[in-house]
Image: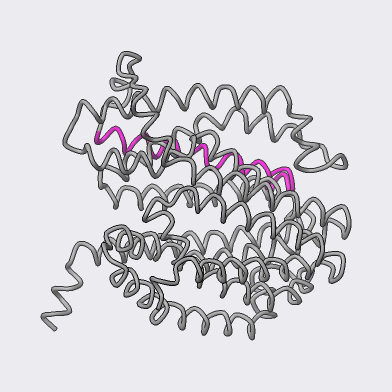
Amino acid sequence: MGFVKKYTQNNLFRITSFNSLSVLLKIGIGLITSKLLAVFVGPAGMALVGNLRNFLTSLESISTLGFQSGIVKYVAENEKNKVEIQKIIATVCIALLVVVIVLSGLLFFLASFWNSRIFGDNFEFSLVFKILALALPWYAISIFLLAVINGLGKFKNVIWINCIGNTIGLLVSVLLILNFKTVGALLAVVISPALLFFVTFYFINKEISFFDTIRFRLFDFRIIKNLSSYSLMALVSAVFGPFVLLAIRNHVIETLGIDQAGYWETMTRISSYYLLFVSTLLSVYFLPKLSNSKTNQETKTIFWSYYKNILPVFIIGVMLIYFLRFFIIRLLFTADFLPVESLFFWQLLGDVFKVCSLILGFQFLAKKLTGTFIISELASLVVLYFSSLYFIRIFGIEGVVIAQAFDNFLYLFVLCIYFKKNLV
């Protein structure tokens, strides 16, 4: 009992447990939002929301220049150096403001163009892009502030911000969806993240006098140059990935209909919920270990620890999800979404391949293998896009998840060959 008490009082245990509660809260809120979307906007609305989310993911990375990971690293390294911290904050904030002002202008004045590209000519939601233009600066700065807080080692504050932000997002979604249906769902996607600014600003001001730090004389181009090497991998993955998914979804809408695209978006949402546990565990526990590993033997031990302890639990979990698929669809969505059942097998199989490859893919980040990562990521996206077009023509909407499973298997196969010396 003394050991248990000592372990549970450990700071790392408390932070990890707190983070698990944050993940569960995020999933719970996501499930409620999914139910609202299913009831009030249906499969077609779900597809449109999916398109906007993909677009916003890419826009987020461009507006922040993919600097998040680099900001965390440099702030952490200079935590005791107040002058350098001020330079980092001033430099990045000024650079981001310039970028988001340009992006906001393009969004606002070309709203009709973006509406046509994201939603097609049959829908008129230009207002959404004009509001997104006004919300984007707040959203981008909130992401930047969150990275600074993370770099300062205030992990509990980061978790609190995420919890509060997710709760605000739920309230905004409920209010807008109930009152404005599909338009409300789209507005919730662009407004909720921007409101996170006020939460992050409150917490950052407890650590740093933010407005006193933003001075043009503190701008240092050296910091931008250093951060750029960390942003390249983030930008390639976060920009090209969502745009490929957006292109595939638009192809599904044109060839199979918007409801079919909505079914795929529904399956993607379900997948994202259970994958969140694995991705969080990788980021919090395995990535630091891989970064600190010095020899092939150490890396091999980390890889096999993941495969022996995490993978079997995940496989049991997805098997359970498969057998409960009808119950899950009815619980989280409505009877209108029962056709999603046909997508479960290939989605779950593809996710098993994906989880197998995630730990290997994290080695790119841990060892800063930038060139190899970019080549493999782009090649994977090309395979996904063209295999989706091919399999959709043969199998209909099931072709998308078959293509994902094929792409994930091929990616895993290539990574196993590349990291063979770390596995055998």
Magenta span: predominant SS is helix
Looking at the image, which residue sits at the far left?
A: 2
Q: Colour scheme used in the picture?
A: one colour
Specify the quadrant of the image occupied by residue 184.
Answer: top right
Residue 225, above or below 287: above
Instruction: Say if the magenta span includes residue 198.
Output: yes
* Rendering coords of residue 70 (x, y %): 37, 41
Left or right relative to 125: residue 237: left
Q: Residue at x 78, y 43 (%)?
A: 119
Query: Which quarter of the image is occupied by the C terminus?
Result: bottom left
Specify the quadrant of the image occupied by residue 3.
Answer: bottom left
User: Which one is in front, 4 or 307?
Assistant: 307
Total marks placed: 0
Residue 391, above or below 311: above
Q: Which residues are magenta?
A: 178-207
* Rendering coords of residue 179 (x, y %): 70, 45
* Rendering coords of residue 18 (x, y %): 32, 62
Residue 301, above or below 94: below
Instruction: Say if the magenta span includes residue 243.
Output: no
Q: Residue at x 73, y 76 (%)?
A: 341
User: Which one is in front, 86 or 373?
Assistant: 373
* Rendering coords of residue 66 (x, y %): 48, 40
Q: Residue at x 62, y 29 (%)?
A: 133
Looking at the image, which residue sits at the far top?
A: 217
Query: Which quarter of the image is occupied by the N terminus?
Result: bottom left
Left or right relative to 5: residue 40: right
